[in-house]
Image (spheres, rainbow, N blue to C red):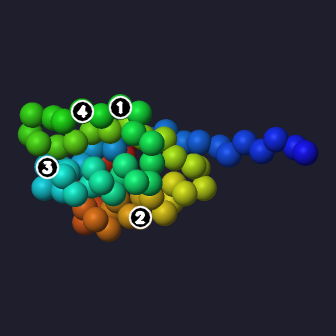
C-alpha cells in the first residue's frame, strides 16, 4: 500500500456584508474554516483550507452566490 496525500490549498476570502450571512453556511460545508473575522462594515473574512482539486469549483460557487463581489487572496 502506498500512502496517498491530497494536496490542500489555503485561501483568504472576503465576502461583502450583503452576502456574508448566506455565504458562511456555503463555505463551512465545503471547506475547513481556519480563521474568521467579522469586519465593522458587516463583511466576513475567512481563511479556509480545501482540497486543491476542488478549488476551481469552490471559486465558481463563491462567485455565483456573490455575483462576483467576493475577494480572494
Helix, strand or loop at mark 1 = strand
- Residue 35's disc is 1
Residue 6 x %, y %: 68, 46
Crowding near pointer 3: few (<14 within 10 Å), some, many (20+)? Answer: some
The residue to which callout 2 is attached is 60
Instruction: Give the Cα distance between marks 3 and 4.
Output: 12 Å
Q: Along the horizontal axis of the image, is 16 left or right of 32?
A: left
**Quarter occupied by the N terminus:** top right
- In this view, the residue in front, 4 or 73, is 4
The residue to which callout 4 is attached is 37
Determine the image quadrant of residue 54: bottom right
Marks 4 and 1: in contact by CB < 8 Å? Answer: yes
Q: Along the horizontal axis of the image, is 63 left or right of 31?
A: left
Of labels 1 and 3, earlier in sequence is: 3
Note whether 69 is above or below 2 in the view shown: below
Marks 4 and 3: in contact by CB < 8 Å? Answer: no
The residue to which callout 3 is attached is 17
Residue 27 x %, y %: 36, 52
Amino acid at each position: 500500500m502506498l500512502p496517498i496525500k491530497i494536496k490542500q490549498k489555503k485561501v483568504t476570502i472576503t465576502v461583502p456584508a450583503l452576502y456574508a450571512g448566506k455565504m458562511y453556511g456555503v463555505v463551512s460545508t465545503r471547506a475547513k474554516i481556519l480563521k474568521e473575522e467579522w469586519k465593522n462594515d458587516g463583511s466576513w473574512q475567512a481563511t479556509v483550507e480545501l482540497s486543491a482539486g476542488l478549488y476551481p469549483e469552490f471559486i465558481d460557487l463563491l462567485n455565483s452566490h456573490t455575483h462576483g463581489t467576493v475577494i480572494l487572496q
